């Protein structure tokens, strides 16, 4: 569970709020479960302000579109709702994240960067772009935190509460490990084998000259390594492999 996710809090009608969809994602609950919890405790929540909602069209698990209510809770309502959830480790961690996010955004609006409220839409777009990039690139935890810190510094957000991540598993390039394990095959050939086994995939990004391709480990491949951000371009990944699991990887592809 990643509790340093960005773009949690929104500014609606000059009040900071969080959607029940975000609460569901961050607490590993189904949106319907959180929606039912809000409905069940509606009168309690309305003691802390009017319940705001929007009607949105969303796709279900089979791709069909349905209209649904998306509630946006203020800080007090969100805090109260969290007390109604089962106190799992994930929920406990998100409670802390929620407090920090509301505090951070409130501080920025009240005492922080000048004209922040006027630029809020741009900031939200930047944060959404970061969230999308992290999801598309499928990067490891260290890269997620690095990308988040880089953007936060760019747009003037506080980074001190973000975790420092230490990856204890050593990873190396494919060429390095092939040489170390004395495998008589080229990295280019092994890459083709890994792609055919669903461990590696080719992705593309737009560039000035058209499209540029790069390699990325799939969900299956992340068992054997991690996707590092390329030092040449932050929109590309560079697969590295765990030395401790490299022999298992070779066995899997029958080498």
Image (cartoon, rainbow, N blue to C red):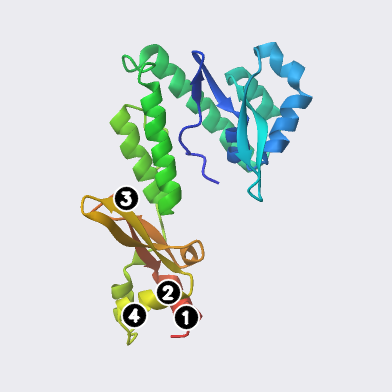
Q: Earlier in the sequence, mark 3 or mark 4?
A: 4
In the image, what residue occupies the spot 33% across and 67% down?
Answer: 172
The answer to whether the residues at label 3 and label 2 have Cβ atoms under 8 Å apart is no
Distance from the alpha carbon under mark 2 to that under mark 4: 9 Å
Which residue is under mark 2? 194
Label ID, residue 219 = none
Distance from the alpha carbon under mark 1 to that under mark 3: 29 Å
* Badge 1 density bin: few <14, some 14–19, many ≥20, Cα 10 Å: few
Q: Which residue occupies the extreme bottom position in the image?
A: 184
Whether residue 124 sits left or right of residue 56 in the image: it is left
In the image, what residue occupies the spot 67% across and 32% down?
Answer: 68
Q: Would you identify the image quadrant in which residue 140 lies?
A: bottom left
Label ID, residue 189 = 4
Distance from the alpha carbon under mark 3 to that under mark 4: 25 Å
The answer to whether the residues at label 2 and label 4 have Cβ atoms under 8 Å apart is no
* Badge 2 density bin: few <14, some 14–19, many ≥20, Cα 10 Å: some
Q: Can you say whether 105 is above or below 234 in the image?
A: above
Instruction: Work out which quarter of the rendered image holds the C terminus and state it.
Output: bottom left
Label ID, residue 235 = 3
Q: Earlier in the sequence, mark 1 or mark 2?
A: 2
* Badge 4 density bin: few <14, some 14–19, many ≥20, Cα 10 Å: few
């Amino acid at each position: 569970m990643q509790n340093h996710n960005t773009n949690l809090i929104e500014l609606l009608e000059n009040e900071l709020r969080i959607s029940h969809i975000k609460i569901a994602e961050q607490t590993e609950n189904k949106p319907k479960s959180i929606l039912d919890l809000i409905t069940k405790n509606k009168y309690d929540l309305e003691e802390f302000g009017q319940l705001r909602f929007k009607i949105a069209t969303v796709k279900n698990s089979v791709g069909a579109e349905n209209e649904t209510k998306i509630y946006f809770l203020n800080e007090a309502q969100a805090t109260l709702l969290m007390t109604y959830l089962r106190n799992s480790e994930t929920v406990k961690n998100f409670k802390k994240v929620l407090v920090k996010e509301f505090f951070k955004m409130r501080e920025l609006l009240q005492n922080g960067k000048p004209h922040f409220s006027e630029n809020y839409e741009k900031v939200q777009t930047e944060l959404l772009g970061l969230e999308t990039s992290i999801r598309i690139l499928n990067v490891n935890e260290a890269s997620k935190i690095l990308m988040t810190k880089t953007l936060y510094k760019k747009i003037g957000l506080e980074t001190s509460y973000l975790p420092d991540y230490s990856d204890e598993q050593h990873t190396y390039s494919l060429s390095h490990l092939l040489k170390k394990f004395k495998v008589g095959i080229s990295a280019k050939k092994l890459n083709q084998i890994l792609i055919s086994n669903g461990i590696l995939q080719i992705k593309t990004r737009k560039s000035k000259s058209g499209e540029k391709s790069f390699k990325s480990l799939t969900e299956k491949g992340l068992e054997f390594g991690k996707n590092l951000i390329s030092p040449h371009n932050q929109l590309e990944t560079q697969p590295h492999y765990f030395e401790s699991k490299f022999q298992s990887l070779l066995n899997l592809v029958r080498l």
